[in-house]
Image (cartoon, rainbow, N blue to C red):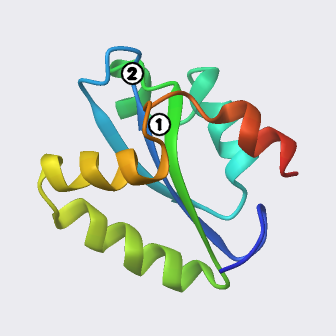
Amino acid sequence: MSSIGKGGNVYIMSNKYRTVLYIGVTGDLNTRVIEHKSGNGSAFTKKYNCTDILYYEFYDSIEDAIHREKCLKKYKRKWKENLIRKFNPDMKDLFDKIHDLR
């Protein structure tokens, strides 16, 4: 795995009620999350107000990150929630944490 902005990053965004999960991949996590927060990230995250980052992973290559994203998207919601809660037990927005990693 690599640092922020290098290689690839897989992440999970949600709305403030945690009723929607969005899984994405990017080469620059901080910039991408800012795009989602401003409503410019994707049509899906804009439509469902997914502005909070709950989970992320770093990979040495974007190809590895894309592979992981595809795998995560296949799992049921309960499995995804368990993954998030192991990483972020309170399911709080981690933007300040990733912003500090730059």
Q: In the rendered image, which residue does mark 1 sit on? A: 42
Q: Position of residue 96 (x, y in %)?
A: 75, 31
Residue at 37% x, 45% y is 85
Q: Using a 10 Å C-alpha cutoff, classify the residue at mark 2 as few (fewer than 14 neighbours), some (14 to 19) or many (20 or more).
A: some
Q: Is residue 44 above or below residue 16?
A: below
Say which amino acid is labelled 2: Asn
36 or 11: nearer the viewer: 11
Residue at 68% x, 52% y is 29
The picture quadrant where one finds residue 47 is: top left
The picture quadrant where one finds residue 4 is: bottom right
Query: Mark 1 and mark 2: span between their CA atoms?
Result: 14 Å
Residue 15: which numbered mark, if any? 2
The picture quadrant where one finds residue 74 is: bottom left
Say which amino acid is labelled 1: Ser
Q: Position of residue 18 (x, y in %)?
A: 31, 24
Q: Position of residue 46 (x, y in %)?
A: 44, 23
